[in-house]
């Protein structure tokens, strides 16, 4: 008994250790570390483990200072085109950047507006007797006018280290032909509003850090066909008090060295093609990937499942006259009684059941017979209808023949009646003459 107790305790300990190891492996393979604080800007919706250190890291080293756009028009002053193209920076309230930010001229564009005006004037000439009067008639024409608007696109950048909540939250860009990747529509996310940029772009911004951060994306600059991205310069975001003049802005040679790409860890996205110029913006790589739940990993945790080997085992079975079966235990060599077997000649419930193939055959045969029956009924009904129509046609032909016969015999009958009346008149005339001759 002591050995049994010791063996039982040993088995229990082994089972407990196995369960503990399995639980640790399951937890290790399905742990995703990240920020669990839903109010943090670094909240990770896939995380199931982490501490405050993952929430304290800033989401990016760059901030967005907004955009603004100036416009000047030339041509006919009848159309105000610049009112649609001008855009003030809400952070400064004017065509400028907020304090601490510098303006970068991204692109110069042109927008031409044509319109027609229909005008009519009265033309007078002498008319009437001896040209003593003046007559007027309207003379109309169509005048074509054109107004050209020249606009300049500026975005505000701050080089060097910045505060975590400086500037605007960036919510993507959309145009008339390219949707916003954040919303996949031609609109801004919730708690964001658009700023007019270029001819037909909308830049989504927000300063609602509490509610807007969930839909914001880390921003890392703009570049176009004419100027590069100053934030892509090496180590520029790690320095303090760096100005655009120090990195070559303001002279043609300096801005040519600005790389037309995004910083490391950021990817470029096409905003629009404005007046034959490509406008791109930079955001964190994979930030536009659609959220998806992590796949739960179950044991075994290897790349492939272990294969099962087919092992052949020789087993000797003895069936007794009463239906009992005996098998030999390979480890002990003793014969052991197996499950009871029904005696020969007894009715087996399992054997009395029909095989699946037999059931399928019966079902197929019944289906064929049903189809034949339906086909026979359809053929009989069609034959009956055809015979009925043929009988109606024959009756109609007979009626027509009788009508024709009666129509042809009517003139003959009229003629015979006329002949009879003529003969009676002749006879009456002859009798009258005879009476006169022989009184």
Image (spheres, rainbow, N blue to C red):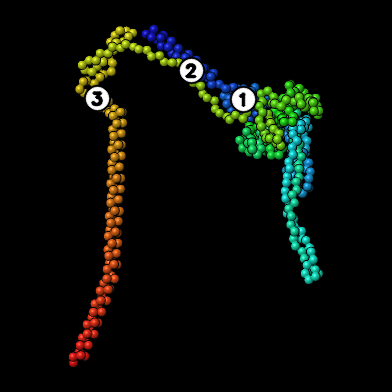
Q: Which mark is residue 79?
A: none
The kind of secondary structure element at disc 2 is loop
The numbered mark, 2 or 1, whose residue comes first in the sequence reads 1
Q: Quick one: label 2 or label 3, which is nearer the N terminus?
A: 2
- What residue is rendered at 64% in x and 38% in y? 177
* Quadrant of the frame with the C terminus: bottom left
Residue 191 position (above or below residue 339):
below
Q: CA distance from mark 2 to mark 1?
A: 32 Å
Secondary structure found at label 3: loop
* Residue 348 circle label: 3
Residue 330 vertical position relative to residue 355 in the rendered view, above or below:
above
**Mark 2 sits on what residue?**
304
Q: Give x and y (percent) for residue 432.
A: 22, 87
Which of the two marks, 1 or 3, is nearer to us in this view? 3
Taking the spot 48% from the left edge, 19% from the top edge, the residue there is: 299
**Residue 69 seen in this snapshot:** no
Residue situated furthest left in the rendering: 438
Residue under circle 1?
35
Q: Is residue 225 above or below residue 71?
A: above
**In this view, the mark in front (2 or 1):** 2
Closest to the observer, 241 or 224: 224
Q: Residue at x 37, y 12 (%)?
A: 311
Question: How far is mark 2 from mark 3, CA to CA?
Answer: 44 Å
Residue 100, image x, y percentages = 78, 30
Q: CA distance from mark 1 to mark 3?
A: 65 Å
Instruction: Look at the image and tell me whether residue 338 can be seen.
Output: yes
The answer to whether the residue labelled 1 contacts the one labelled 3, judged by CB atoms less than 8 Å apart, is no
Q: Are marks 2 and 3 in contact (CB under 8 Å)?
A: no
């Amino acid at each position: 008994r002591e050995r049994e107790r010791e063996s039982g305790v040993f088995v229990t300990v082994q089972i407990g250790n196995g369960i503990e190891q399995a639980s640790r492996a399951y937890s290790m393979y399905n742990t995703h570390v990240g920020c669990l604080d839903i109010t943090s800007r670094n909240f990770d919706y896939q995380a199931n483990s982490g501490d405050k250190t993952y929430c304290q890291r800033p989401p990016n080293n760059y901030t967005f200072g907004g955009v603004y756009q100036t416009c000047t028009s030339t041509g006919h002053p009848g159309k105000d085109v610049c009112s649609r193209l001008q855009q003030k920076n809400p952070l400064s309230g004017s065509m400028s950047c907020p304090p601490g930010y510098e303006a970068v001229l991204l692109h110069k564009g042109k927008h031409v507006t044509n319109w027609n005006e229909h005008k009519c004037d009265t033309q007078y000439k002498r008319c009437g007797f001896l040209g003593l009067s003046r007559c007027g008639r309207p003379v109309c024409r169509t005048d074509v006018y054109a107004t050209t608007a020249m606009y300049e696109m500026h975005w505000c950048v701050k080089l060097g280290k910045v505060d975590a909540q400086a500037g605007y939250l960036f919510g993507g860009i959309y145009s008339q032909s390219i949707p916003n990747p954040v919303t996949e529509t031609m609109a801004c996310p919730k708690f964001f509003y658009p700023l007019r940029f270029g001819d037909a772009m909308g830049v989504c911004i927000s300063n609602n850090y509490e509610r807007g951060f969930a839909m914001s994306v880390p921003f890392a600059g703009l570049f176009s066909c004419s100027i590069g991205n100053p934030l892509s310069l090496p180590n520029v975001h790690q320095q303090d008090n760096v100005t655009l003049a120090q990195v070559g802005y303001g002279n043609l040679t300096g801005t040519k060295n600005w790389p037309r790409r995004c910083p490391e860890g950021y990817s470029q996205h096409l905003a629009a093609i404005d007046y034959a110029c490509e406008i791109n913006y930079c955001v964190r790589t994979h930030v536009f990937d659609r959220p998806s739940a992590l796949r739960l990993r179950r044991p075994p945790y290897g790349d492939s499942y272990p294969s099962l080997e087919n092992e052949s085992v020789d087993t000797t079975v003895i069936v007794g006259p009463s239906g009992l079966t005996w098998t030999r235990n390979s480890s002990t060599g003793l014969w052991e009684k197996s499950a009871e077997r029904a005696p020969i000649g007894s009715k087996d419930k399992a054997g009395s059941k029909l095989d699946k193939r037999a059931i399928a055959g019966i079902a197929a045969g019944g289906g064929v017979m049903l189809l034949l029956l339906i086909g026979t009924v359809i053929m009989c009904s069609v034959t009956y209808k055809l015979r009925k129509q043929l009988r109606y046609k024959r009756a109609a032909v007979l009626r027509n023949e009788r009508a024709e016969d009666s129509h042809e015999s009517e003139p003959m009958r009229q003629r015979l009646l006329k002949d009879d009346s003529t003969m009676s008149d002749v006879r009456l005339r002859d009798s009258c003459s005879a009476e006169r001759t022989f009184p």
